[in-house]
Amino acid sequence: MIALRIFSVALPWALTGSICLAQTQAVALPPEPMEKSVVVIGAGISGLTAAYHLHKAGFKVIVLEAGGRVGGRMGTDVVDGVVIDYGAKYLSSAYATLMPLIEELGLRKDIKEVDHRQGLVLRDGKPRKIDPDSPFSSLLSGLLGPRSWLKFGWYVVQTRRSARRIDAADFYAWWAGLDDETAASWYGRRLGTEIADFVISPMLEGLFFQAADEVSRAIPHIFIAFSGKAGKTLVLTQGIGSLPQALARMVEVRLNTPVQRVESDPDHVRVTSGTEIVTAGWAVLAVPASAAGKIYPQADEFERELMASGYSSTIYIAVAMDPGGPKKNALAGASGLLIPQKEQNDIASIALESAVVPGRVLIGDLVHVYLAKNATNQLIGSPDEEIVKRMMPQVEKYLPGVSQRMRFARVYRWKEAIALMPVGKGGDILQYRQSRSSKHRVWLAGDYTAISSGDGAAESGMWAANQILQRGRP
């Protein structure tokens, strides 16, 4: 089924090397009209997208970043010649915000299409094949029984048909209209527990690290509705971190500059960082919800509702392997394995880089291992060595000999990986966007203010920039 393409290859979401950006210093915007000056707090993809578009429109923009690098959750390491995207990994050719940016920044030459091989979902201890080019694969592999297969196929057709009438301007109103029940409850009641357990659950855990009983039913509905328009899955050959790095080179970014307070007056904003105060016409607050709530005490009820958003957590292990080992294993010929909650021990998903992006790893292979929710909660503060030691025997079940072939293992922890999308979130975002007026000087951006994806985060930055452009032009 076409909808299953979503999670058959799209496992979850800056090079960390040096970048020539201005360091912390006395902050003073030039004597341009106040209405044409903006301070952006946060150099993740949402903040950088906002800054770039405002800069192009002739605004004076400063980006203040608390950390020592740009990109936020779009990060890349290069270890022993191996490119590791340790946050967001994949792009889509259908992304409405990021793809035009990639084109403008001259990064199209670095794009490579992901190999759409069959994916696997574990059921009854056995990997079940899902071939995105074969609608019968989930039936023939035993992932779904005949009744569930027919029921889900009809649901996909109807859902995709209804989405044809939805345009970008109506998206959040449409989301809010679906935002009435958890995914586990709605799909279990309407389509049956088999579909809820072995299609919806692994989709949500694989993409968002969130369980079906804590996510609105609107989220899988939205992804399935637009699966026919999903486009090609892509990677950047130099790492996804090259995108925020390219954006950062176009604007003024000040690293290691934490912000303590954002204040808004009728005609300007004041942003306090250390002993300096930046005064500007507008501010884009593009940091995670928890950080935004601490530094913006003037938030109104709609902003506070969004800034109360929680996040899912995850631990990702990148295991580089030397060549060799048995050719027959559970992942042979597949892009990856998703392990539904009912089947889990400590691992939620495993993928092989060579199967997803052939030729990206020149020697050996790279194994992507994402921990399940319970294991993440238990181990988030544990030493790397302890996490690797506990996980490798379980990885061995699917990739025999991986421990002997392991060249190195890198552990990455994300306490705030992806913004939660519970029932009511779509309505909160819609109310926030509809409640803004000419009196507002501070604009929120980030994945907690949009659909939780890389393109959603970028769209939120674009939206914030457009609101300022509409109000800040003479």
Image: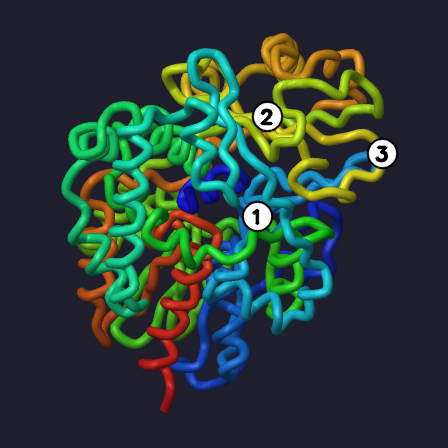
**Amino acid on which the number 3 mark rests in the picture:** Ile
Please tell me which of labels 1 and 2 falls first in the chain. Answer: 1
- The kind of secondary structure element at disc 2 is strand
Which residue is depicted at the point 42% across and 67% down? 462
Q: Residue 240 in the image: state x and y as whole percent.
A: 63, 51
What is the quadrant of residue 193 in the picture? Answer: top left
Q: Would residue 79 appear left or right of 181 to someone viewing this image?
A: right
**On the picture, is 215 further left or further right than 21?**
left
Q: What element carries label 3?
A: loop
Mark-to-mark CA distance, 1 and 2: 16 Å
Residue 186 x/y as whole percent = 19, 34
Residue drawn at x 85%, y 34% is 363
Looking at this view, is 186 or 460 the one in front?
Answer: 186
Q: Name the residue under label 3.
A: 363
> Looking at the rendered structure, which numbered label has been put on residue 369?
2
Q: Which amino acid does label 1 sit on?
A: Tyr
Quadrant including the C terminus: bottom left
Among numbered discs 3 and 2, the one appearing first in the sequence: 3
Q: How crowded is mark 3: few (under 14 residues within 10 Å), some or many (20 or more)?
A: few
Identity of the residue drawn at 38% across and 35% down: 204
* Amino acid, disc 2: Val
Residue where numbered disc 1 is placed: 90
Q: Determine the CA span between mark 3 and mark 1.
A: 22 Å
